[in-house]
């Protein structure tokens, strides 16, 4: 027991041999390199269509499978991270994440089904990397939880930028091997960075709170609702966890509807292709920025209030976008869509932060993995598949209205959590949830 207490009282420099902020930098790099799977897809996909002759259905299926498998991968990734630590998980995830993209360079010799299967495996292990990066912040930065998770989440949006430009620079008449060489390099970078950063990772002792002296004196640790460190099963026995899942499903589905259909929305209102492109690029930039700004605001006014305000504003501005689009204002439509996604984009940092705030750091990987896998998986199915059905069956205005209402509801259902966070009490060796 005394050895455990001694370990808990060691600073980050005592445990690691260096400042914990280096771990943040490593997590940022790991998160950045899996970004191309989602955020560089729009520039990668046309090359697949041109080189392999894949039809739009096959191309869109690969993107949908990424959203679903990456989301579902965060749950086992979190469980294994909490059980075995970050090193082994990162090495395995790094290998398969690289292979998932690498196989896309062999579409001329492998069938589409084989490529899709290996792609899905790679996407699944990207979920391991995503969870590991977020969990690093929850475990090592309870005093900077919101801003660090915001920055790590932003890396998932911004990390694709160094990959996008080399792909965009490939001439249309260039030999296929030029594109394949870029894929080979990307796969090597993805695997190499994840493996190397993972081998340098380490988790703190359970219940650790002793930061370096300068950090401890300058930053006051935000007090959690209770000191209980929840296991995944215990977290799932609180009604607040299910409210978070419901909110996450609603808001993720809402934003993914806009992201996956932005070009179609612009076209439906007879705006130019340039307008749709500006919306798409603006969404990618502001979505990442939102995660940083949202974390900063959450430190000031509280994470639960920030979530409610952001999601309601996201829904309101998407309704404004519809109103301005029907009025024929392309500028108003573009601006409102981008603002709506700005308030939406913070969800990936805010939900991760509130899981650590409510349920503690010890099992934060599995707790967030359960929340993320359940919510983004369902939200991705709606945003990628069901929204397309609504769009083709009921039209653009109806689809936008449904999406807006979902965002509004996602913020409203969180209001009870302002005064009723999960709190546990010990009674006859049984844990009883209050509120």
Image: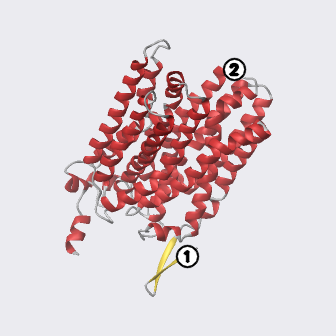
| Residue 137 percent across, percent down from the top left | 38, 51
Q: How many numbered marks are there? A: 2
Q: Please determine whether, in this image, residue 383 is positioned above or below residue 112.
A: below
Q: Nearer the viewer, residue 24 or 135?
A: 135
Element carrying mark 2: loop
Residue shown at 54% from the left, 53% from the top:
301
Q: Please determine whether, in this image, residue 123 is positioned above or below residue 41.
A: below
Q: Nearer the viewer, residue 317 or 377?
A: 377
Q: Residues within 10 Å of mark 1 (few under 14, many from 20)?
A: few
Disc 2 to disc 1, C-alpha distance: 55 Å
Element carrying mark 1: strand
Q: Is residue 329 left or right of residue 290?
A: right
| Residue 73 percent across, percent down from the top left | 45, 51
Q: Nearer the viewer, residue 266 or 313?
A: 266
Residue shown at 39% from the left, 53% from the top:
135
Q: Is residue 43 left or right of residue 401?
A: left
Q: How is the image coloured?
A: secondary structure
Dot label at residue 252: none
Dot label at residue 272: 2
Q: Quadrant of residue 426?
A: bottom left
Q: Is residue 97 visible?
A: yes
| Disc 2 versus disc 1: nearer the observer | 2
Q: Which residue matches tag 1?
A: 434
Quadrant housing the C terminus? bottom right
Q: Is residue 310 visible?
A: no
Q: Is residue 185 left or right of residue 310?
A: left
Instruction: Specify which label sits upstream in the sequence, 2 or 1.
Output: 2
């Amino acid at each position: 027991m005394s050895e455990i207490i001694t370990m808990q009282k060691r600073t980050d420099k005592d445990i690691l041999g260096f400042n914990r902020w280096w771990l943040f930098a490593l997590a940022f790099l790991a998160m950045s390199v899996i970004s191309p799977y989602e955020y560089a897809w729009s520039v990668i996909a046309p090359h697949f269509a041109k080189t392999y002759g894949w039809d739009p259905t096959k191309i869109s299926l690969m993107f949908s499978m990424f959203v679903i498998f990456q989301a579902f991968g965060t749950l086992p990734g979190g469980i294994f991270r909490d059980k075995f630590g970050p090193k082994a998980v990162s090495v395995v995830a790094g290998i398969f994440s690289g292979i998932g993209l690498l196989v896309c360079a062999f579409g001329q010799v492998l069938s589409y089904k084989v490529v899709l299967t290996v792609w899905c495996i790679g996407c699944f292990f990207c979920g391991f990397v995503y969870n590991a990066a977020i969990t690093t912040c929850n475990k090592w930065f309870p005093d900077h939880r919101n801003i660090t998770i915001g920055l790590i989440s932003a890396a998932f949006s911004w990390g694709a930028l160094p990959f996008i430009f080399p792909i965009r620079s490939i001439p249309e008449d260039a030999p296929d091997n030029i594109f394949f060489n870029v894929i080979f390099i990307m796969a090597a970078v993805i695997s190499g960075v994840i493996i190397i950063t993972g081998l340098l990772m380490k988790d703190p002792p359970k219940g650790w709170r002793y930061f370096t002296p300068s950090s401890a004196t300058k930053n006051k640790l935000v007090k959690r609702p209770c000191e209980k460190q929840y296991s995944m099963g215990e977290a799932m026995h609180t009604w607040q966890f299910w409210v978070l899942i419901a909110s996450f499903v609603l808001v993720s589905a809402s934003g993914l509807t806009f992201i996956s259909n932005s070009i179609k929305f612009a076209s439906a209102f007879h705006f130019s292709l340039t307008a749709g492109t500006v919306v798409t690029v603006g969404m990618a930039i502001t979505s990442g920025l939102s995660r940083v700004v949202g974390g900063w605001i959450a430190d000031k006014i509280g994470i639960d209030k920030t979530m409610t305000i952001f999601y309601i504003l996201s829904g309101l501005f998407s309704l404004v976008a519809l109103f301005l689009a029907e009025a024929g204002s392309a500028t108003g439509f573009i601006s409102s869509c981008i603002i709506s996604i700005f308030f939406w984009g913070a969800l990936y940092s805010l939900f991760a932060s509130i899981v650590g705030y409510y349920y503690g750091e010890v099992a934060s990987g599995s707790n967030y993995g359960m929340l993320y896998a359940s919510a983004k998986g369902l939200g991705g199915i709606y945003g990628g598949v069901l929204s397309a059905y609504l769009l083709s069956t009921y039209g653009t205005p109806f689809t936008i209205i449904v999406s807006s209402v979902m965002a509004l509801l996602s913020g409203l259902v969180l209001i009870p959590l302002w005064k009723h966070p999960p709190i546990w009490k010990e009674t006859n060796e049984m844990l009883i949830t209050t509120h």
